[in-house]
Image (cartoon, coloured by chain):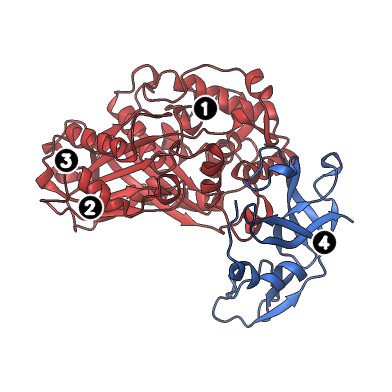
Chain colours: A blue, B red
Amino acid sequence: MITMSVPRFWRKQIARYNLVGTYCKTCEEYFYPPRNVCPSCRREGEIGEFKFNGNGELVTYTVIHAAAEGFEGQTPYVLGIVQLEEGPRLTSQIVGDPKEMHIGLKVRPVFRRLGQSGERGMIYYGTKFVPA
Amino acid sequence: MREVAIIGVKNTLFGEQWDRSFRDLVVEAGVGAVEDAGVAGEKIDSMFVGNMSGGQFVEQEHIGALIADYSGLAKNLHVPSTRVEAACASGGLALRQAICAVASGMDDIVIAAGVEKMTDVPASKASSALAAAADREWEGIMGATFPGLYAMIARMHMHRYGTTSEQLAEVAVKNHFNGQFNPIAQYKNKITVETVLNSIMVADPLRIFDCSPITDGASAVILAPADIAHEYTDTPIYVKGTGQASDTIALHDRRDITTLEASVVAGRRAYEMAGLGPKDIDLVEVHDCFTIAEICAIEDLGFAKKGEGGKVTQQGETAIGARIPVNTSGGLKACGHPVGATGIKQAVEIAQQLRGEAGKRQVDGAEIGMTHNVGGSGATAVVHIFSRNR
């Protein structure tokens, strides 16, 4: 179970809600999840914010039957790695029929409830993907 | 840098041990290894303990001191004891730190131990603790599980190389076969490909028999400078190479989903230090936390071409007595996977094999062996090469 405090979630809210990551102006490399140090040029890099439109394709995926704690009500659910058009990859749930999933599937982002910190805890939201 | 040798080894039983506590397990392993080496407590200069998550599994931190205390090495001798953590590679890293301590000349006799007590919490809590080895904020929060991450590796491997579920199953079948000859193994039952393919789905395409279990257990080895190893044992096992490498914490940031680059680089570093290559290795213990992980490991370490790990497994090339025996102990799958202990257990298995003490699972004439221990979905890897000849 993810038992994150309110501030721990809140401080990354913009990144999670709006797919805001970063990019390195020196290398023209894009990062989501956001990074503050470029792995290619490190301290030479000049890092800025970048909002992704979220269009991408499915690199690989699984259909989870034994859920992570807190996700029991959602099984089976599809978890995938999505590559955004600008290059970065992220892990997300793909909403839809597991039978329709395939490597290379074009996807687009949707704003969804991700989970809840325990029975009475904070409900948290973020970005999932659906077939485009 | 000084040469280093293993002079004593011990594994506890691996399994669900309701009657034994965290400290019971690690003290049995540590004292057993010290007895095996015939070394007095006063001679011990330091100890390193691999433990992934005492905090989550038994709500105990400050593991190093606890273990020194209950091993009888704290109250009077005040032996320095350091806990090492790198998720499932904690044991392998503890061993590497211990090797560094001896090689540097700082310490002579050093204990490297590993322990995990995983069954004092419900399975759901154990899975959640293990998920902390991945990126909690960018993988875990989306509902990722460890089987789920390795399932995504498996899916890509199947897509790109034509690897089949039957080939994955062959890894589990072989490791269960080997496990029946290992007295400490959690599972000593033979299984078939059908057993695996008919078991419940955990994270498609991985089924429950593709996954290593939840295990209690501890392991320990005693290290000494090679120059004095013969004072303690007739069969010292020499450390020829050690390599460690890091990669991105999240699977999605890897250059290639089907390659654990940390394994490739740690392997290369160990091979270079030893002046050896894959053809020189007589047997290897790899980190088969899932069946696909063994297939990737034998490719990444150079025992199979990329994409052919499933094929060579199916052809029997990784069985005892074949080209390159893999996981003679039963591996994580059948011997069990007490996460902090696994990296040390692998070294114990190789030492027993190179000493010729592995009983019915003995690899005839084994002279050089390798261990490969992975943390998370591949963010840490550590590889060691051992030889019975100096």
Mark 4 to mark 3 CA distance (whole Å): 61 Å
Q: Could you tell which of marks 1 and 2 lies nearer the N-terminus?
A: 2
Q: Is residue B365 left or right of residue B143?
A: left
Q: Which residue type does callout 4 highlight? A: Pro
Residue A109 image offset from top left, x and y in percent: 82, 61
User: Of B53 and B364, which appears nearest the observer?
Assistant: B53
Q: Could you tell which of marks 3 and 1 lies nearer the N-terminus?
A: 3
Q: In the picture, which quadrant includes the N terminus of chain B?
A: bottom left
Compared to residue A57, the image places residue B176 above or below, namely above
| Mark linked to residue B102 | 2
Label 2 with label 3: CB-CB less than 8 Å: no
Q: Which residue type does callout 3 highlight? A: Ala
Which of the 4 quarters of the picture holds residue B306?
top right
- The residue carrying pointer 3 sits among few (fewer than 14), some (14 to 19) or many (20 or more) residues within 10 Å by Cα, namely many
Q: Nearer the viewer, mark 4 or mark 2?
A: 4
Residue B293 image offset from top left, x and y in percent: 57, 39
Is residue B91 visible from the viewing direction of this image?
yes
Residue located beneath label 3 in the image: B229
Residue located beneath label 1 in the image: B318
Mark 2 to mark 3 CA distance (whole Å): 12 Å
**Are callouts 4 and 3 both on one chain?**
no
Question: Mark 3 falls on what kind of element?
Answer: helix
